[in-house]
């Protein structure tokens, strides 16, 4: 009764609006195929990035000069920042993985900005975050094998003592689960908060615009940073014992 009274005064969102917030994204029909809205948005963002990369490679990079200025200066700042970030976590081994780290950061941030245009961010779809986590998981193990060898990677699971094998195997197996659900949970929660604010009449003016700056920029940046730091930390752990390079 109290809930109905407050809803009538516009103090609480209606139950219908809350029920519209779904964990699974809506499906869209594309040439007879049913695909998720988030997958379509991901393809569009990827296409935009690919076109930009081709344009930069064909028309910008050939014009690079010894003393950078303009767009060259911006690009070099991005590259230098990314290399310093990976080197801070992996030392001399970091430069080889700077491109991957930059790409993942670009995808998470770029796709999340689509919420500003009224679309559901792909990172609020568990399939998107699982895909990123699995790629990182494969790279983490490839990193370990490259620097310690296959036998060295196997011996890692028996360190520091042989009886730690079950613990090491379990903790290592849950890495993709941890990475994907942490990113998904935080960004999905942000989307839910924004939807609830928009559904409340007297809060739908001004406040969502201010909070959008936080949830679409600052919050996304923090979660992206955490995802990348954890990925690099797990990489560093794989060479804790017996790195040959």
Image (tube, rainbow, N blue to C red):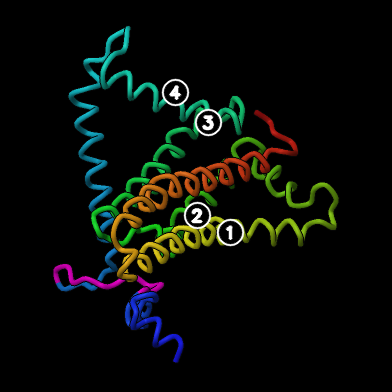
Residue 80 tag number: 4
Alpha carbon distance from label 2 to label 1: 8 Å
Q: Earlier in the sequence, mark 1 or mark 3?
A: 3
Q: What residue is shown with label 2?
A: 133
Alpha carbon distance from label 3 to label 2: 19 Å
Q: Nearer the viewer, residue 155 or 47?
A: 47
Q: What residue is shown with label 1?
A: 178
Residue 89: give x, y in percent of width and height: 60, 33
Alpha carbon distance from label 4 to label 3: 9 Å
Tell us which disc is closer to us: 2 or 1.
1
Q: Secondary structure at mark 1?
A: helix
Count residues near mark 2 (Cα–Cα under 10 Å), then give few for <14, some for 14-19, many for 20+.
many
Assign the C terminus to one quadrant of the image: top right
In the picture provided, is 135 more to the left or to the right than 34? right
Q: Quadrant of residue 91?
A: top right
Q: What residue is shown with label 3?
A: 85
Classify 66 as above or below 142: above
Which span of residues is magenta-colored? 21-31
């Amino acid at each position: 009764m109290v809930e109905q009274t407050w809803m009538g005064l516009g103090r609480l969102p209606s139950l219908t609006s809350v029920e519209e917030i779904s964990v699974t994204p809506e499906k869209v029909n594309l040439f007879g195929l049913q695909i998720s809205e988030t997958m379509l948005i991901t393809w569009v963002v990827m296409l935009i990035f690919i076109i930009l990369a081709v344009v930069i490679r064909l028309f910008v990079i050939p014009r690079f000069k010894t003393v950078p200025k303009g767009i060259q200066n911006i690009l070099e700042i991005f590259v230098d920042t990314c290399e310093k970030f990976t080197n801070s976590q992996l030392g001399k081994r970091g430069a080889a993985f700077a491109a991957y780290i930059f790409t993942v950061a670009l995808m998470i941030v770029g796709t999340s900005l689509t919420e500003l245009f009224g679309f559901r961010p792909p990172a609020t779809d568990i399939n998107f975050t699982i895909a990123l986590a699995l790629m990182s998981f494969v790279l983490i193990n490839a990193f370990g094998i490259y620097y310690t060898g296959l036998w060295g990677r196997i011996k890692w699971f028996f360190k520091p003592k042989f009886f730690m094998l079950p613990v090491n195997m379990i903790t290592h197996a849950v890495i993709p689960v941890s990475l994907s659900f942490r990113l998904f949970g935080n960004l999905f929660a942000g989307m839910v908060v924004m939807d609830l604010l928009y559904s409340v009449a007297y809060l739908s003016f001004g406040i969502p615009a201010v909070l959008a700056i936080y949830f679409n920029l600052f919050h996304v940046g923090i979660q992206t940073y955490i995802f990348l730091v954890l990925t690099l930390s797990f990489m560093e752990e794989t060479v804790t014992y017996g790195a040959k390079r």
